[in-house]
Each structure stands twice: as C-alpha cells, then as structure tokens.
Image: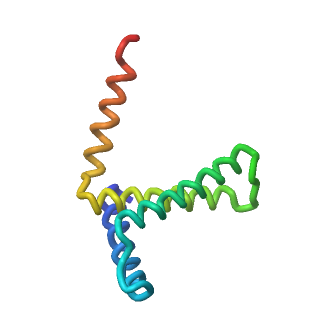
Amino acid sequence: MEFQQMQERARSVRARYAEVEANAYGRSWTTEEIMLGFLGDVGDLAKLVQGKAGVRPRDDLDEALAHELADCLWSVLTLADAYDVDLAAAFGSTMDELDEVLAAPD
C-alpha cells in the first residue's frame, strides 16, 4: 500500500470512528483525546517490546506487535491529518536532516 493510500485509509477509518463516538458520546473525540488514545497504544507497544525481549511473553506476540505498530501508525497519520501536516514531506526532510547530522564529522 502506498503512503497516500495509507493516509486516505486512516482518514476513512477516523471518519467512521467519529460517527461511532458521536452516537455513543454525543460528539467525536478531540485531537487531544486522540492523542491520549495514542499514548495508551504506545504503552501497549512498550509491553509488547518487552515481550520480544523475553519479558511479558505471550503466545500471539508477533501478531500483537504488528497490530499495535499499525494502531500507532494510524494515530500518527490521524494526528498529522488533523493538523494539516504533510507527513510524507516532513518525514523526507527530517530524514535528510538526520543524514546530514550523521554524515558530519565529529
């Protein structure tokens, strides 16, 4: 799946979540609430990384890790969309900056 397709898919899923939230809570989540959900997902990801290191083992570790990484990516894509960040461009320029730092002599 291309990056633009991923972003569009994340946007579509976010719109569907907004409908569910509106029905359940009378409004959709704010960007702050989406961020708090992301923090929860990062916490879950941290536990799975511990599992890969031999701490907190579980039978479905690889599948759970892949799922949680995808959840985190969805949150990043959703937050970027909410704040009109061109994430593909920002990623490219950030990697360029890091390459320059890493190539610089000490």
- How many numbered markers are drawn? 0
Of 41 and 9, nearer the camera is 41
- What sort of colour scheme is used for the picture? rainbow
Name the residue furthest top: 106
The location of residue 81, given as percent across then percent down, is 29, 61
Which residue corresponds to the image point at 28% horizontal and 44% vertical from the top-left?
Answer: 90
User: 104 above or below 82?
Assistant: above
* Residue at (40% x, 11% y) in the render: 106
For image coordinates 65% across by 53% down, the residue present is: 48
Q: From the viewer's perspective, is 39 left or right of 61?
A: left
Q: Position of residue 46 (x, y in %)?
A: 61, 50
The x and y percentages for residue 84 are 23, 57
Residue 92 higher or lower than 87, as above or below: above
Q: Nearer the viewer, residue 15 or 38?
A: 38
Image quadrant assignment for residue 1:
bottom left
Where is residue 27 shown, x and y percent of the image?
35, 81
Figure check: 10 above or below 72: below
Q: What residue is rendered at 44% in x and 86% in y?
A: 24
Give the quarter of the image for residue 25.
bottom left
